[in-house]
């Protein structure tokens, strides 16, 4: 799972929270690198993306409180 999580982090790295939240989480699932993944690994990848979006949402809330 580490390599898949790394790809997800790279895909979202440098983007603002709103961009992460608006991104289609299936872009990685539809990519070439997932063609041979088992269903279990695909679920794990989706869980990583879901967690990253949760962090983006929390960060955005903190930033909005500061403004």
Image (cartoon, rainbow, N blue to C red):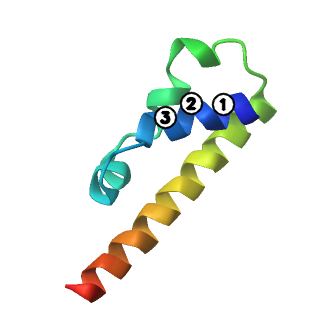
Quickly name the residue at label 3.
10
Residue 13 screen position, x and y as percent? 42, 42
At horizontal 72% and vertical 41% (from top left) the residue drawn is: 44
Task: Estimate how packed mark 1 is, as few (under 14), some (14 to 19) or many (20 or more) residues with alpha carbons within 10 Å.
Answer: some
Q: Secondary structure at mark 1?
A: helix
Task: Tell me the CA gap for discs 1 and 3.
Answer: 10 Å
Q: Secondary structure at mark 2?
A: helix
Task: Estimate how packed mark 3 is, as few (under 14), some (14 to 19) or many (20 or more) residues with alpha carbons within 10 Å.
Answer: few
At horizontal 69% and vertical 28% (from top left) the residue drawn is: 3
Quickly name the residue at label 1.
4
Displayed quadrant of residue 23: top left
> In which quadrant of the rendered image does the N terminus lie?
top right
Residue 50 screen position, x and y as percent? 56, 53
Depth check, front residue: 43 or 61:
61
Q: Secondary structure at mark 3?
A: helix
Depth check, front residue: 52 or 47:
52
Q: Is residue 48 left or right of residue 32?
A: right
Displayed quadrant of residue 62: bottom left
So how many labels did they put on this image? 3
Residue 24 to residue 38: above or below: below
Depth check, front residue: 49 or 66:
66
Displayed quadrant of residue 35: top right
At horizontal 50% and vertical 18% (from top left) the residue drawn is: 31
Residue 4 screen position, x and y as percent? 66, 30
Quickly name the residue at label 2.
7
> In which quadrant of the rendered image does the C terminus lie?
bottom left
Report if the CB atoms under discs 2 and 3 are less than 8 Å apart: yes
Report if the CB atoms under discs 1 and 2 are less than 8 Å apart: yes
Front position among marks 1 and 3: 3
Residue 51 to residue 48: above or below: below
Q: Is residue 49 left or right of residue 35?
A: left
Residue 45 screen position, x and y as percent? 66, 38
């Amino acid at each position: 799972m580490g390599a898949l999580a790394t790809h997800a982090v790279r895909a979202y790295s440098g983007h603002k929270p709103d961009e992460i939240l608006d991104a289609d989480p299936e872009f990685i699932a539809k990519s070439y690198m997932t063609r041979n993944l088992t269903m279990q690994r695909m679920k794990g990848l989706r869980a990583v993306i879901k967690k990253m979006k949760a962090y983006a949402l929390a960060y955005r809330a903190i930033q909005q409180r500061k403004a």
